[in-house]
Image (cartoon, rainbow, N blue to C red):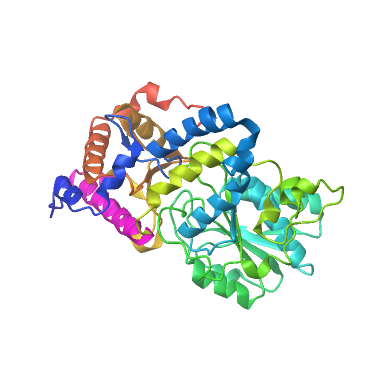
Amino acid sequence: MMNKVFSAEQLDSKDPIRHKRELFSLPENTVYLDGNSLGPLPKAAELRAREVVNEQWGRDLITSWNKHEWISLPSKVGDQIGALVGAKSGQVICCDSISVNLFKVLSAALKMQPHRKVIATTKDNFPTDLYMVQGLIELLGDDYRLEYIDEHNIEASLNDEIAVLMLTQVNFRSGNKINMKDVTALAHKHGILTLWDLAHSAGAFPVELDDAHVDFAVGCTYKYLNGGPGSPAFIYVAERHQQRYKQPLAGWMGHAAPFAFEPDYQPAQSIKQNLSGTPGVIGMSILSAALEAFDDVSLKALDEKSKKLQTFFICEAKRAGVWDAFDFASPVIDNRGSQIALKHKDAYAICQAWIAQGVIADFRAPDILRIGFAPLYLRFVDIEYAVAQLSLIIEERQYEDPAFKQKHHVT
């Protein structure tokens, strides 16, 4: 048993970013521990959606491409994201999805390494990352191959045959966080280009792409960045590579002069080359408004609060006697992202029972109860309530109810 040093209410009263919660539309009687999968609705995003639909599209029609600078949204939003991932202006563009963006970057990176034929990654990387590599290799032919390396012993796996090292900074199941700067430096010693997936990093803690000398990165915006379901993703291409970089999806928006309507493609000599089709204005406008929630707060402050929330959760779970019902499937706090993974053979049913009590968490196959700690809007009283409900679910074995074992299409 662990005694509390401060109550949840006291911790909330001392929280320097507690005012950020008011920026979100959060349902009453709900504790949301799944912001690492889909962030909640920012109030500013809702207002922006109405403005874009009713006023810009509804009233100004096609003139909005100029009047409201729709055409500049990918670059504008890209720079907003860049400020959150340690990238100076002109290196991040907002477009498409992570999957499509991975295809672009991997293709371009391989072209920059013509004498190397290996893409290295971890077997427990997020599946879409693996699938995109597999599809690209099938397209390119047998000369190329995918090589799996040990996430916990990356240095020993690197060699001079690898063209691209593709890693997700935070493992989607366990939350294990790879040291981006150290691993990038090790890769560069072998002449390897690095590609980082920031899906579980951007907006959760400080990411320093420029400082780490990262080559390329991709990321989504619907998790900690709260851009909404299916919101557009982003690409980072380090400025030093932009002249040599050439991605294959040569759409008109990536042309150096798209409105010249020339028959032959001439790529933009900038991050804009990653654009292909017409940008999704409504989604990108909503995302731009959502990102304003990060104004006047440092990523360091968010990281500090996340660690406090995680520590409080573990202390409360131990105090309530529920911690030992699970196997802890995450590394120590300094080596993980803003999430905790608990292993249990009935994790899916436990998650569903928790949701029934107003605590929304996440399940990841085969047996992980995944808990996200999004510091912009989570309170310590939320964590206290969540643990109390989890304790009852375990103690009373509520998860054995057959209703909680019925698998939904989205798990």
In the depicted structure, whether residue 369 falls above or below residue 80: above
Task: Name the one closer to the observer, 391 or 66.
Answer: 66
Q: Residue at x 57, y 74 (%)?
A: 186
Q: Quadrant of residue 381?
A: top left
Q: Which residues are magenta?
A: 299-324
Q: Nearer the viewer, residue 272 or 18?
A: 272
How many labels, in total? 0
The answer to whether residue 161 is visible is: yes
The answer to whether residue 310 is left or right of residue 150 is left
Question: Where residue 176 sits: x, y (%)?
Answer: 44, 57
Give me the residue at 55% from left, 41% from top. 284
Residue reaching furthest to the bottom: 189
| Residue 110 locus on image (x, y percent) | 74, 62
Residue at horizontal 35%, vertical 58%? 303
Residue 214 sits in quarter: bottom right
Residue with the most extreme right position:
263
Q: Is there any visible trace of residue 223 in the rendered image?
A: no
Residue 192 x/y as whole percent: 66, 70
Query: In which quadrant of the rendered view does residue 386 lie?
Result: top left
The reply, left or right, for residue 245 in relation to residue 406 is right
> Does the segment drawn in magenta span residue 68?
no
- The relative height of residue 155 versus residue 232 in the rendered view (above or below) is below
Q: Main secondary structure of the magenta part?
A: helix
- Image side of residue 345 versus residue 387, left or right: right
The residue lying furthest to the top in this view is: 403
From the top left corner, tell me how far across and down residue 362 is, in percent.
Answer: 41, 38
Foreground residue among 349 and 239: 239
Which residue is painted at 37% across and 30% down in the image?
352
Q: Using the image as rendered, state which of residue 87 and residue 308 is in the foreground.
A: 87
Q: Is 321 one of the magenta-colored residues? A: yes
